[in-house]
Image: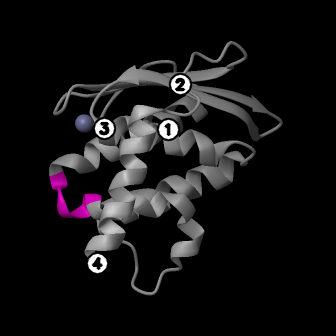
Amino acid sequence: MDNELRELYQQVILDHNKSPKNFKKLETANHSAEGYNPLCGDRIDIYLDIQNGIINDVSFQGSGCAISKASASLMTTILKGKTIEEAELLFEKFHALVTGKLEAGYSQNELGKLIVFAGVKDFPARVKCASLAWHTMISALKEDNKLVTTE
Ligand code: ZN
């Protein structure tokens, strides 16, 4: 990745950390879960309003490092209107991206804005920060109203 691109990605992450999207408790939520990353101290609550298998609305609350917060924020902007199956598939792709397991030649278009987290794979300690919101969202989908830890 060239430096210019890396800086652009970092700017997107900083912007989402500073002004997170969908940062609120969702009153209409029928699924929710609480995530905790003890390595960094990140806490993220995910709220989902699911109607007929489609994510009608999604929001998050919590506190943590810039990566965990920006990842949650970006995730909420992408999941709205997606089916449960699409959300699960996106989780798998995102996880492959941040752990450096994305197959060569894989279309980056399918990841959309999530590509800004591509640099995380070079920082293993940050992988859990970036994926906390996603793990928590998957747990919320299954309607486990419980605490999720990345351990
Ligand atoms: Zn963190």
Relative image position of residue 11 (x, y in whole percent): 37, 52
Q: Are marks 2 and 1 in contact (CB under 8 Å)?
A: yes
Q: Quadrant of ligand 1?
A: top left
Q: CA distance from mark 4 to mark 3?
A: 22 Å
Label of residue 73 in the image = 1
Residue linked to disc 4: 2
Please indicate, yes or no, whether residue 101 appears anywhere in the rendered image: no
Q: Quadrant of the C terminus?
A: top left
Label of residue 23 in the image = 2
Q: CA distance from mark 2 to mark 4?
A: 32 Å
Q: Is residue 139 left or right of residue 121?
A: right
Picture quadrant where residue 103 is located:
bottom left
Residue range in magenta is 120-124
Amino acid type, mark 4: Asp
Residue linked to disc 3: 66
N-terminal of the pair, mark 4 or mark 3, is 4
Relative image position of residue 129 (x, y in whole percent): 29, 41
Q: CA distance from mark 1 to mark 4?
A: 25 Å
